[in-house]
Image: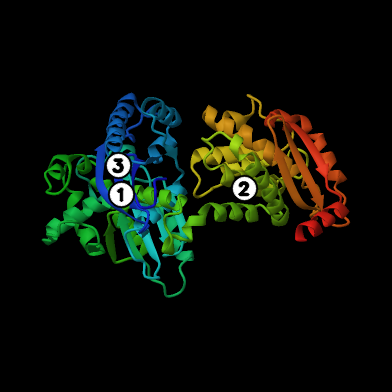
Amino acid sequence: MPPASQEVRVAAIDIGTNSIHMVLAAVDQQLRSFSVISTEKASVRLGERDPETGDLTGQAMERAMQALNHYRQLAESHEAHAVVGVATSAVREAGNGREFLALVEQKLDLPVDLVNGREEARLIYLGVLSAMDFAGAPHLILDIGGGSTELILADSHDTRSLSSLRVGAVRLTQDFGVHGALTAERVQFLKTFIQGMLEPAVGKVQQRLAAGESPVLVCTSGTAMAVGSLLAFRLGITTPGLNGLRFGLGHVQELMRELVTLDAERRRQLPGLSERRADIIVTGGLILETAMELLNTQEMVLCKRALREGLIVNWMLRHNLIVDRFSYQSNIRQRTILHQARKYGVDSERAERVARHALILLDACRQDLDPTVAEARELLWGAAMLHACGRHISSVGGYHKHSWYLVRHCTLLGYSEAEHLILAALVRYHRRSPPKKRHEAWLSLQDAGQQRCVQQLSPLLRIAVALDCRPQAVIERLDVAPTARSMTIQLTPFPGANVSLECWSLDNCRAEIEAGLGRNLRVEVVEVVEAEALAETASD
C-alpha cells in the first residue's frame, strides 16, 4: 500500500450477463472513504450462449475481451493501484466459463474471480450500504440482472437473508422468446413463472422480519435504472440523476401495462431508453413489478451503487480501510467459517488449538512462502477450523475426503472461488496421502499458483493436526526454528502431561511432512522442570 497520505486508485470490474461495468474510484486512506472518478459500461451480452451446449459463444467472448482490454488500459492510464474483477451468472453457468476467465488472465493479465450467487448478493449489499444511511431500519435490496436476480434483507450491521435466483431480464427474453408486443395471457404466464421463481426468497425474507417491521425496498442496477428513467420522463421529473428517486407500485404497474403492448421498434423510440436495454426492458420490468407485488411493498427507492461499488468496499475492508458501520462486515470470513464449523458439529476447542499451532508454524516459515500467497493466514486458519468437519458424515479413516466435499460445496462468504478451492484442498490434504494428479481436489485447482499454495501450506496444517491427538490440551507452548535444511519443533507440555503420543503422531507422517517442507523435521520435548527453571530465570 502507498503511504497513508496518498490517494489510492482502485478499479472494479463486474462481468455480468448483459453488460460489463467498470468503476474507477479514488480511495482516501485517511478519511477511509472513496469517491467515484469514472464509470464505464459495455453491453456485450455474454448471456447469449450457445443454445445447444450452453457455452459462451466465440462472438460474445470476443466482445468481452475487447471491453476488458479497454478497461485494463483505462485503469493503467489512471495508475490504478489495484484492479478487482468478478464474473457472475453467465460465466458461472457456462461450461467454458472458467476457460474464458483463464483466457482473460492469460491474454490481458487481468485476474477475475468467479463468485457464487450469495457472495454476489453480499457485494451488492456493501455497494448499497456505501451510498445509503439505513438509519437502523431493515432494508430490502432488489438487483435485477441479466441472468439472475438478487434479493437481500439487511440492516446497517449485517445481512439477514441473501438470495440469488436464476431469473433475469436476458434469461427470460431468451428462454421465452419475448420480443414483440404481448397478449394479456402471455403477460400472466410470464408473471406466474416469475412468481414461482421469487417465492422461496420472499418467504425467507418474511420469516426473518420481526413483527411490525416494514423494510424499505431499494432497487439497483440496469433494469431498475431504466424503469426509473422512463418513469421520471412520464412524471416530468427533471433531476440530473436517478439516485434516491422514489416511485410507487402503481407507477410501475401503469408503465408495464403500456410497455407490454409495444413492439420492439416502438420501445427503442422511447426517450431515455437505450436500444440494447429496449430489447429486455419488458422482462426486467415484469420481474420488478412481480417482486413488488409479492413483497407487498408500495414504493421503491433507486440506488445507483451496487455490485461494482461493493467490490471497492470489499477491497477497502480487506485492507483495513473501513470502520464504523462496515466493521461487522470486515470479519465476514471468520464468521462464515465459524458458521460452517458449528453447522457440521466441529469440536471448536480442538479446532482452535489446531489453528493456533498452524499459525505459529506459518509465522515461523513466512519468509519462505511464495509471495503470491497473499491470504495465506486466513486460508490456513479457515482450513484448520474446518479440517475435521467430515466427521459429521463419518469418523472413520477417510473423513478428510468428506471434509473436502463439505467445504468445497458449502457457501463461504468473503472468499473468492480461487480461495475457496485452495481452502478445500488444504482440508483434503491435512492427513494421509499428499496431492496426486488424479485426485479430484487437486484437479479442481485452476492453476499452478493455487497448487503451489496448497503444497506450501498443507504440511503446516498436517503438523498442527498431528499435534492434536486427544480431546484435552497437553501442549502448553510450541516453538519453531526453521533453517535452510531443517525445522525444529520444540514442545513444552503442561505440567504432568506426556506428549509421547504427539511425538509418535508426528513421526508417523514424517515422510509426507518432510517432502512437503523440503526440510528434515526435528522434534524436541522441553522437560517441565526445565521449562519452569527457564521461566524463573527469565523473571529474574
- SS for tag 1? strand
Counting from the top left corner in percent of width and height, residue 289 is at 29, 56
How many labels, in total? 3
Counting from the top left corner in percent of width and height, residue 429 is at 68, 36
Which quadrant is the N terminus positioned in?
top left
Q: In terms of depth relative to the viewer, which is nearer, 73 or 228?
A: 73
The residue lying at 42 percent from left, 54 percent from top is 321
The mark lying in front, picked from 2 and 1, is 1
Residue 60's mark? none
| Residue on which disc 2 sits | 381
- SS for tag 2? helix
The residue lying at 35 percent from left, 31 percent from top is 49
Q: Residues within 10 Å of mark 2 (few under 14, many from 20)?
A: many
Q: Amino acid at mark 3?
A: His
Counting from the top left corner in percent of width and height, residue 206 is at 45, 65
| Residue on which disc 3 sits | 21
Q: In terms of depth relative to the viewer, which is nearer, 520 or 473?
A: 520
Q: Amino acid at mark 1?
A: Ala
The residue lying at 86 percent from left, 53 percent from top is 528
Counting from the top left corner in percent of width and height, residue 502 is at 82, 44
Q: In terms of depth relative to the viewer, which is nearer, 6 or 33?
A: 6
| Residue on which disc 1 sits | 26
The answer, for residue 429, to whether it is visible in the render is no
Task: Say if 446 sits above or below 258 in the image.
Answer: above
